[in-house]
Amino acid sequence: MFSRINKIKYFYKKNLLFLFLIFVLKINFLAASEWEQKKNKSGIEIYLREIEGSEYKELKAIMKLKTTLVSLVSLLDDTASYPLWIYQCTKASLLEKTEMENSEIRYTYTELDFSMITSKRDLITQSTLTQDSNSKTIFILLKGFPEYITKKENIVRVAKLNGFWKLEPVNNGEILITYQLHMNPGGNLLSWIVNSTLIDIGFETLHKMKKMVLLPKYKNAKIIKIKEP
């Protein structure tokens, strides 16, 4: 009986943060309308929806990919690679990283070049990674921290950001990848410009991610704490 109780305690301790993040996601995205599909091409689906109290829409981009969880996490952990695949990203650096037994918290700095339509943007993102011990699904919760470092001249700081990456093992060795994002880009920027740009952000990011994850450095990566299904 004692060993059984210990196993139950261990299970809840190990999954507590994962369950808490799921709860936070449900609260954050509760006041939202139905998704509207905006693009379906090359195995990538793009959806937008209205968010109550915001003039900016929320993005959801999904695709299935025959790869491993370790390969995807390795790519997402490689901050220096962001300009190669994240839409309009020109600079990225890791500010801080804390690793725990069952989770990881990272703070990254990113610059985005939208100079064709508006001023450059930068953002500081907190990424909290957890993995469900049963389904092996990985959640990476994204939250903006605009005051984390001093603002730079001639670059507009993204005022607010919430979202996540969800990496869910499905059938035949495939991973269902969901990228969800809602943000206030800051500055005086018309909402229709932001909302139309979201489609490109979702599609181009996942399209390039599909190619990047096949590179040997990610395909052959090893991360002990990430468990494959």
Image (cartoon, grey):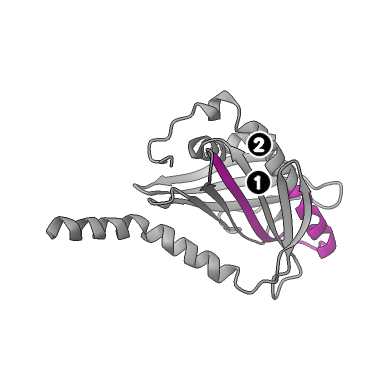
Span colored in magenta: 174-202
Looking at the image, residue 67 lies above or below residue 62: above
Which residue is found at the position 79% from the left and 58% from the top? Answer: 194
Residue occupying the far right of the picture = 116
The residue where tag 1 is placed is 63
Q: Amino acid at mark 1?
A: Met
Residue occupying the far left of the picture = 2
Looking at the image, residue 115 lies above or below residue 224: below
Camera-nearest residue between 225 and 55? 225
Residue occupying the far front of the picture = 172
* Residue 199 located within the stretch drawn in magenta: yes
Closer to the chain start, of discs 2 and 1, is 1
Which residue is found at the position 56% from the left and 36% from the top? Answer: 75
* Residue 227 located within the stretch drawn in magenta: no
Q: Quadrant of the N terminus?
A: bottom left
Q: Is the C-beta separation of discs 2 and 1 under 8 Å? A: yes
The residue where tag 2 is placed is 210
Left or right for 5, reference 212: left
